[in-house]
Structure formats: C-alpha cells, structure tokens
Image: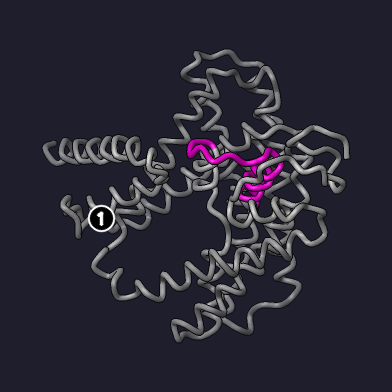
Amino acid sequence: MESIDHVILIGAVVMSLGIVVGAFSARAGVPFLLVFLAVGMLAGVDGPGGIRFSNTWLSFLVGNLALAVILLDGGLRTSYATFRVALRPSLALATVGVLVTAGLVGLFAAWILGIDWKLGLLLGAIVGSTDAAAVFSLLHSSGIRLKDRVASVLEIESGINDPMAIFLTLTLMEWIAAPDGLTPVALAMRLIVQFGVGAVLGIGLGYCLAKVLERIEVAEGLHAILICSGGAMIFAMTQSLGGSGFLAVYLAGMLVGNRDRAVTSDTMRAMDGMAWLAQSAMFLLLGLLVSPHRIWEVALPAIAVAAFLTFVARPAGVLLALLPFRMSMGERGSLRGWVCAARCPSCCRCFRCCAGCRSPA
C-alpha cells in the first residue's frame, strides 16, 4: 500500500508542478505542453525526480486515449460552416502536404544522419504531420490571433491528417521488412480503408451518439463522461476495422457538437477540462520516457532535422498543397509559420464565403 501511496503522491506533485509552472511560463510565451514535457523529463531518470519509467505500452495506451479525447473536443467545437469553408484546403494539406513534408524530411534525414534512405523516409513519415494536441492547445490558449479561415484550416487539417501519416508509417515499415510484399493495389486499398472506413464510421456512429445524447438526461457532470466514453468506443471500433479512429472521432465530435440539444455550455466547459487532462498526462508520460543523457549524442543532427522540417519542408508542403486554392500569401504564410495577417483579405473567391469577414465569394 505504501508504494501505491507514493505513486499517487508523485503523480499529483508532477501534475501540479506542471500546471503551476505552466501558468507562469505562459506569460513569457512558452506553451503549456512544452512545460509538461520538461517537467516529465525533470521527474524522469536523469532529473531530480529520478523516476525510472520505460512502460511504452502504457504510454501508447494513454497517448491513443488522449489524442482521441483531444480530437473529440476539437470536433465538438467545429461548426458545419467552418468545416465547409476549410475542408478542401485542409484535405490538401492533410494528404499532399504531409506527403511532401515527409518526403523532404526523410531525404534530408538520410543525408545528415548517414542512414539508408528508406529509414530516412520512415523518420519523415513519423514527424511529417502536425500534432493535433499541440495545434488545438496553441490555438485555444496561447493568445495567438489568427483569422477564422486560417485557424479553421489548421484545426481541421490537424484533425484529419492522421490517416495519411499512419498509412505512410505502416507502409514504410512493411516495405523495409519485406520489400517484395507490397503492391500498388494493396497500397491504394490501405489508403482508401484508412480514410473511407474512418469517415463512414465517424459520421454514422457520430450520428447515433448525437441521437442518444439528445434523448438521455443525465447529471451535468456525467454528460461529458458519456461523450468521452462514446468517443472512445467509436475510436476503438474504427481502429479494429482498419480505419482511422482519429478521423472517426473528430467527425463524430463535429456531428455531436452541431446538435443544439446534444451538448450544453456546461458540457463544453467540462470537455475542456477533459482535453487538458488528456494533453497534460500524455506529455508528462512522453517526458518521463526521455533519457536526457542520450540527447547529447544526437542533439546536433536532431536540431538540424527539426530546423529543416520547420523552415524548409513544411513551408514547401504547404505551398504545393495550396497551389490550387486562391489564398493570399499572408494566409499561406500564416499556415506555414502561424504569422497573423493584419487584416482580412478580400480574396476569398475559392470559398463559398470567407470565414473571417463573412462576405460572399
């Protein structure tokens, strides 16, 4: 029993420390999630905490559940109007943008690390997509001011890019293990299943969940828990059928959030707390998994890869993905580097309406 008490105490101290330090660091512009990651590293094996944690299975479980809750919360806050305005550029960024980014980063990593180009591409596929937790956290709590259209594209792209990232990662892993076992037909079917099953089940099961929430009356504290458990079921069912559970739970959240009787303002506040708990727990565990003494061995090439991803690969992916869309350079710059444009441009001919100024196309 004493060890259980110690685990609870350590977990509470680490979580509280992350929140308190994050509250002060936010004034200096440091993201909350980076603080939780740093606190986890300090509590780990090389830090003052000295906690030896290497349970990757638990981290994988918590990470999947956390991302499901984060994407569910993001979907709840996405309106149909926003989705229609930003869907096409978001889909282009989630497919072409991720593919170009992963390819460029992979080739650069293979060159600078001196590894086989297939392993380099695998590294590019792993880091090539935007992180939903980071995007939603920064947009909602960091004070960054973006126009509605740009913010909508960022949110939706981060919510639907997982199928492409998972497809690239699994395909490259199988290609490295068995180069002759993949065919173009098999690759196309895998991509279709990831997007198709995820979209169909997300819409269908999300509609069912919305109907249940409209007809059942539970205490306010249980409403958000019911939504989270329903989202977890949708995620697990979709994943077990080979689809993208992350895409499914995001679409399900959007369907639920756009039904007036399915959610209330109190439920949304409770979901905000659920999303923060999920984000903080996930990044604390990731921090505990890090061994800082090993960072120095790869620090310089890792920084080089990160810089290339930030300043070359991702901007190139954004520019190529958005070529068919008449978006201003200010908007494309915001999507590349999150630089806020000073005014809402009148160039919105490629959309039915501009979410920033609500003027017709």
Tell me residue 15's x, y (percent). 29, 38
* Colour basis: one colour
Residue 94, above or below 236:
below
Tell me residue 224's x, y (percent). 51, 25
Q: Nearer the viewer, residue 15 or 152?
A: 152
The quarter in which the C terminus is drawn is top right
Please, what is the three-letter code of the amino acid marked with disc 1? Phe
Q: Nearer the viewer, residue 127 or 250?
A: 127
Q: Is residue 177 visible?
A: no
Q: Magenta segment, principal secondary structure?
A: helix
Tell me residue 133's x, y (percent). 50, 46
Measuring 53% from the left and 14% from the top, which residue is drawn there? 218
Residue 101, above or below 335:
below
Q: Is residue 158 magenta?
A: yes
The quarter in which the N terminus is drawn is top left
Q: Which residue is mark 1?
A: 53
Q: Nearer the viewer, residue 186 or 317?
A: 317
Q: Is residue 101 magenta?
A: no
Q: Is residue 296 visible?
A: yes
Secondary element under disc 1, as helix, strand or loop, is: loop
**Which of the 4 image quadrants contains residue 25?**
top left
Image position of 251 (left or right of 73): right
Residue 39, above or below 276:
below
Highlighted range, magenta = 140-160
Measuring 62% from the left and 32% from the top, which residue is drawn there? 76
Image position of 24 (left or right of 133): left
Measuring 54% from the left and 83% from the top, which residue is drawn there? 117
Q: Nearer the viewer, residue 328 or 104?
A: 328
